[in-house]
Image: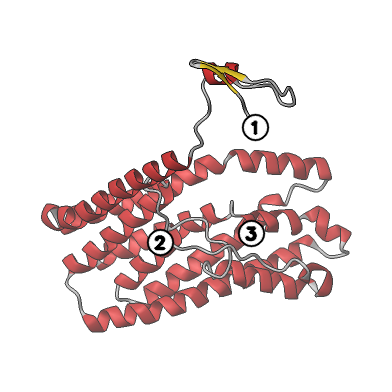
Amino acid sequence: MTTVLALLAFVLAVGAAARSTWSPCGLSMLSTITPLAERGRGHRYGVTCGWFVLGATAGGLFLGAVTSFLAAADRLAGPSPVVAGSVGLAASLVAFTSDTGQAGIRVPVHFRQVNERWLDAYRPWVYGVGFGFQIGCGLATYITTAAVYLMVVLAALTGDPMVALAVGGVFGLVRGLAVLATWRATTAPALLAFHRRFAAREPAARRAVLGCSAVAAGVLAVAVGPGPAVTVGAPVLVAAVLGRTVCAVVRRRRTPVMPGPAAVATMPRPGSGRPADGPGGSVRVG
């Protein structure tokens, strides 16, 4: 079970990091750390990107270090493989349900972004490392997908602190390398064309990370067996159905009722001062 959890955690690390590039914070980095922008500031794009990747990797390792403490605690607790797999399965189903948005319930996130004033106030290595570290941490800036949480849970359930540390490092490295996507956008039209293409790929990235969560849930369901899988999956499924039903009812009540054609025809024109002719005769308005 430890090997299965570790492999899934690494898959989620890559998928969640790639998906997070489409967050407002990730898109901001692809707009501010570019060959065109760095040349305008008198800096070298390659050097700034190097600092950014270094900072993001360090941020990912910091996240991995925190997760390694959770992994050590899991090892001390000594849960059975079935229990560890069942917890991972529940977390995978919750993450998948949250990201689909079908239940109307999402895991808690925050919308913090990096301070772009650093670009004008500090040297390239300062804002490169600073921005990269915050983004590489995964939980310090805008959280786009619940797969980030799922990655942490699966890494902790391995019970291996070194695996947890490595998972965080991979996450930070992938997030940092994303800044190199604009390396050929050396002119304003090229940068605009890049962002158009990049925005068009966002739905595919969303589906890909959903697929990662679904694969994790499927693999863990097989690993723990049908009995525990049903025991864990049934409450999550029921909660998702109830959440979607409640949201649909609330949305229906909040939707304003528009008057029908007959009602519109009998309404007085604004400023006319004339009574409206209703089905039962004349009704004076005002």
Under circle 3, the secondary element is: helix
Disc nearer the start of the sequence (1/2): 2
Position of 99 with respect to 91 (left or right) is right
Position of 11 with respect to 197 (left or right) is left
Residue 64 rendering spot, x and y as whole percentages: 45, 74
Q: Nearer the viewer, residue 115 or 198?
A: 115
Q: Residue at x 26, y 54 (%)?
A: 236
Q: Amino acid at mark 3?
A: Cys
- Quadrant of the drawing holding the N terminus: bottom left
Q: Amino acid at mark 2?
A: Phe
Q: How is the image coloured?
A: secondary structure
Based on the displayed image, in which of its 4 quarters is residue 225 positioned? bottom left
Q: Nearer the viewer, mark 3 or mark 1?
A: 1
Q: Residue at x 53, y 29 (%)?
A: 258
Task: Report the residue marked by disc 3.
Answer: 25
Residue 13 rendering spot, x and y as whole percentages: 45, 61
Disc nearer the start of the sequence (3/2): 2
